[in-house]
């Protein structure tokens, strides 16, 4: 992708060259919002049929929709917004995509080149503002650079560790004629991500794993990003070795949740068995996860006795927070393939006896049933949020349609991660790294656009959903039958939970005062509104929600006092996990007494 | 558990980058955003066609932090190569300083004698001042400035460190 590519033709305008480049990159849909600086692009969109434009109601939602599209298809999501406020509104989405490694190309309008730096109307220093919010960004100052930059942006967004790439497009560049060059496969001048693992390191890793007595595979979003083949290979590897497997929030679905070798999610709200295994293992294989602080808990107490192998496509992920014994830079698909080959080639025999003992221990931990909750089944009983998710999951199992779930951020997100089981990759879209409230509805929109026949559910909280509620308009306009399943406890639940556990029950500003009537709200946006107030309403509402071929808001009124357990409090180690009130062993209960002063400053 | 080496060390890192607008901001933003130290930073185009620039950064941190800095730099799209000169064999590091010393009488004489001992060149003189040009390793410049302080040191302009590996091997 250097300057030596042959110019094939001169396009009438930069905007036309841009659309041609998008088409050649295989783009079929753009999520966007018009404005002065991008009018030439909208004019070009009007005059073609190859690319569909989805008009969102807020630029942040355009990026989240593109994220949902990208995460559910493995393709690059494309966003188009105008200069100034259009670009600044998109920033939250860009950082979200950066943190979760989602491939996005974001096109922003800019004032004409001769006005840049003049504080012109709707001017913002977009490349300056988004430098730390993107994997890379460009300002196109010369028409002859335009098509090369677009092709390069797609290459950078989807290769290596994926991420958002922004292209700032001054209006004169969009209006003036521009030469068009087709994509080529020449390597980039300086950007050459490594995907093939070092064979020596792979052999070292296999030698460690063959001798393991208490192993664990800890898989993450990298396996999802590497594509469905990586998920298949992960399954093959876990089966081959007989190892237990746990997953991060971002990795759910890469390994089937229904498989007996799967221990559930790990980390702050992970299962007891997953966290105890992480704490007690002697060999850990981290496959495409990044030792996030939600996973590790207190770093100096994290898995103290283990040899650690870390596979990541991003060299800067290795030894960033946790020092590892074997660091492998590589793509998950290629590395898993190499690990399987090396495992089969290695002559050492595995200590199957030790492994069987390890599984016995795991079964003891498992028998705690740490996700347990108590639902009173008497008519008139209040609905437990976990029960609502469980019933929703059961109901979707009976559907012929492929099911995709997105979430907002908070308690409902954790309950969804715990109680909704994913057996396939790319079916679970959530804001993991940045924790962006308001992510779920637009993301679900993007998923539904990509999979028009699928069942797409946004599991939401009543506070988060209001952060991008305007997108109900988009659902109506494009007849996207997204189901919004609100666990309504009238609190910013996770904030309330932390205030209960850490701040002496002082519920400062976390009560959702003056909520809208979500049923009427749905109706005003041409959607169906449903409500379940008592346990006997729940299954009926879920069935009706799934039966309707229109957007639905299901307002599920749940227990206001319910907390997410298990929980590793801030600054605690995996084996210091708090279990729910149902667990007698946890006699003192969850009084927050075990949270240290050091832990209190952590988020 | 892998033991961490918590001792601080200084590192001189050379970064070969595409000479494009914003590249220095990317590097500096990386350091400020992630809380790394910059003790010195220099940048200038080094190719005949000005297509590439070389950035020399002097930083300090634990071994883990310095390795992280190198990995983060390597991740930037316009970066061709990151070289840790302090680690990859012997290297040379030099900076240049322009030093204004104001004074008369004995102090002025002493400043001139010391400048001569340090092989600093006089590049400007008035009846009440000298400007010295001094090239050398950072500690040599520091030592000279310490000596000038009581003799009327008035103003300093330093370039920051430029560095290169000894021998025939190159950064590319």
Image: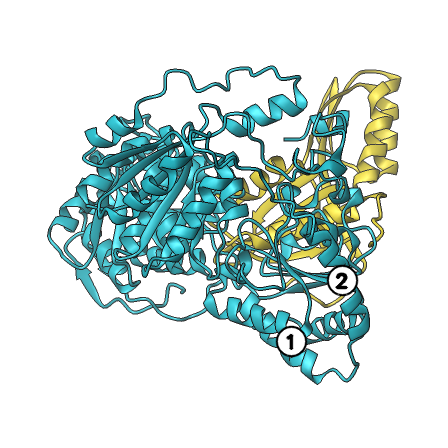
Chain colours: A cyan, B yellow
- Report the front residue among A327 and A376: A376
Task: Give the position of the C terminus of chain A as an image quadrant.
Answer: top right
In the figure, A274 relative to A182: above or below? above
- Report the front residue among A341 and A511: A511
Q: Residue at x 57, y 54 (%)?
A: B75
- Report the front residue among A219 and A516: A516
Picture coordinates of residue A274 (x, y %)? 67, 52
- Can residue A139 be seen here? The reply is no
Q: Residue at x 74, y 28 (%)?
A: A595
User: Marks 1/2: CA distance?
Assistant: 19 Å
Q: Chain of mark 2?
A: A
Q: Is residue A366 left or right of residue A556?
A: right
Picture coordinates of residue A306 (x, y %)? 80, 57
Q: Chain of mark 1?
A: A
- Report the front residue among A449 and A226: A449
Q: What is the crowding at mark 1: few (fewer than 14 residues within 10 Å), some, or many (at least 20)?
A: few
In the figure, A78 relative to A241: above or below? above
Q: Is residue A414 left or right of residue A484?
A: right
Q: Quadrant of residue A260?
A: bottom right
Q: Secondary structure at mark 1?
A: helix
Q: Are marks 1 and 2 on the same chain?
A: yes
Residue A360 shows which numbered tag? 2
Residue B168 shows which numbered tag? none
What residue is disc 1 on? A240
In the figure, A539 relative to A534: above or below? below
Q: Which one is earlier in the sequence, the residue at label 1 or at label 2?
A: 1
Q: Quadrant of residue A148?
A: bottom left
Q: Quadrant of residue A259?
A: bottom right
Marks 1 and 2 in Cβ contact (< 8 Å): no
Q: Hey, which residue is sitting farthest front in the picture?
A: A378
Picture coordinates of residue A374 (x, y %)? 57, 37
Q: Secondary structure at mark 2?
A: helix
């Amino acid at each position: 992708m250097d300057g030596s590519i042959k110019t094939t033709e001169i396009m009438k305008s930069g905007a036309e060259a841009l659309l041609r480049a998008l088409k050649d990159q295989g783009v079929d849909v753009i999520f966007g919002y018009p404005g002065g600086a991008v009018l030439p692009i909208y004019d070009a969109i009007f005059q073609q049929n190859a690319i569909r434009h989805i008009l969102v109601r807020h630029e942040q939602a355009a990026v989240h929709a593109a994220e949902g599209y990208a995460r559910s298809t493995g393709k690059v999501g494309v966003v188009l917004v105008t200069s100034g406020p259009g670009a600044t509104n998109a920033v939250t989405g860009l950082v979200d995509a950066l943190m979760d490694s989602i491939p996005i190309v974001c096109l922003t309008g800019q004032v004409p080149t001769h006005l840049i730096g003049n504080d012109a109307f709707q001017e913002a220093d977009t490349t300056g503002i988004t430098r730390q919010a993107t994997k890379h960004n460009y300002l196109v100052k010369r028409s002859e650079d335009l098509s090369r930059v677009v092709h390069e942006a797609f290459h950078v967004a989807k290769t290596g560790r994926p991420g958002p790439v922004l292209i700032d497009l001054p209006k004169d560049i969009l209006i003036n004629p521009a030469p068009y060059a087709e994509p080529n496969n020449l390597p980039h001048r300086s950007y050459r991500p490594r995907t093939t693992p070092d064979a020596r390191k792979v052999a070292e890793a296999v030698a460690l794993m063959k001798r393991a007595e208490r192993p664990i595979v800890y898989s993450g979003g990298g396996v999802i990003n590497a594509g469905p083949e990586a998920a298949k290979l992960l399954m093959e590897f876990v089966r081959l070795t007989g190892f237990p497997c746990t997953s991060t929030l971002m990795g759910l679905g890469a390994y089937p949740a229904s498989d007996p070798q799967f221990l559930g999610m790990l980390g702050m709200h992970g299962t007891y068995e997953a966290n105890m295994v992480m704490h007690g293992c002697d060999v850990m294989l981290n496959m495409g996860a990044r030792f996030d602080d939600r996973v590790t808990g207190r770093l100096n107490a994290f898995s103290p006795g283990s040899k650690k192998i870390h596979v990541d496509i991003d060299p800067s992920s290795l030894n960033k927070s946790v020092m590892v014994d074997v660091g492998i830079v590589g793509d998950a698909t290629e590395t898993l393939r190499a690990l399987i080959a090396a495992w089969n080639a290695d002559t050492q025999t595995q200590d199957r006896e030790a492994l069987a003992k390890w599984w016995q221990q795991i079964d003891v931990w498992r028998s705690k049933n740490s996700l347990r909750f108590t639902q009173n089944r008497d008519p008139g009983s209040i609905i437990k949020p976990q029960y609502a998710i469980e019933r929703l999951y059961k109901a979707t199992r009976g559907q012929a349609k492929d099911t995709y779930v997105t979430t907002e951020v908070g308690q409902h997100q954790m309950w969804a991660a715990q109680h909704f089981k994913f057996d396939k990759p790319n079916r679970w879209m959530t804001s993991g790294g940045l924790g962006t409230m308001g992510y779920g509805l637009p993301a679900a929109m993007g998923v539904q656009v990509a999979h028009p026949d699928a069942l797409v559910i946004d599991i939401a909280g009543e506070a988060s959903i209001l952060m991008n509620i305007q997108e109900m308009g988009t659902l109506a306009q494009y007849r996207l039958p997204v189901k919004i399943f609100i666990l309504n406890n009238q609190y910013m639940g996770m904030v309330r939970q932390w205030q209960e556990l850490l701040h002496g029950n002082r519920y400062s500003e976390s009560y959702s005062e003056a909520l809208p009537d979500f049923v009427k709200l749905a109706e005003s946006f041409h959607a169906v509104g449903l409500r379940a107030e008592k346990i006997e309403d729940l299954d009926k509402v879920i069935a009706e929600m799934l039966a309707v071929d229109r957007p639905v808001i299901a307002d599920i009124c749940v227990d206001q006092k319910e907390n997410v357990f298990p929980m590793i409090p801030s600054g605690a180690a995996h084996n210091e996990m708090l279990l729910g009130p149902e667990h007698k062993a946890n006699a003192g209960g969850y009084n927050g007494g075990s949270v240290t002063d050091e832990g209190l400053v952590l988020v | 558990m892998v033991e961490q080496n918590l001792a601080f060390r200084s590192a001189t890192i050379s970064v070969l980058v595409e000479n494009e607008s914003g590249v220095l901001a990317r590097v500096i933003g990386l350091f400020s955003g992630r809380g790394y130290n910059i003790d010195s930073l220099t940048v200038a185009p080094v190719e005949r066609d000005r297509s590439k620039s070389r950035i020399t950064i002097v930083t300090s941190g634990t071994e883990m932090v310095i390795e992280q800095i190198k990995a983060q730099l390597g991740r930037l799209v316009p970066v061709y190569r990151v070289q840790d000169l302090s680690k990859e064999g012997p290297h040379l590091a030099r900076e240049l300083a322009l030093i204004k010393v104001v004074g008369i009488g004995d102090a002025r004489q002493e400043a001139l004698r010391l400048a001569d001992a340090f092989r600093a060149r006089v590049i400007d003189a008035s009846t009440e001042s000298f400007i010295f040009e001094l090239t050398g390793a950072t500690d040599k410049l520091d030592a000279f400035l310490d000596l000038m302080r009581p003799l009327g040191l008035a103003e300093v302009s330093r370039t920051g460190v430029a560095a290169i590996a000894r021998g025939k091997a190159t950064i590319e």
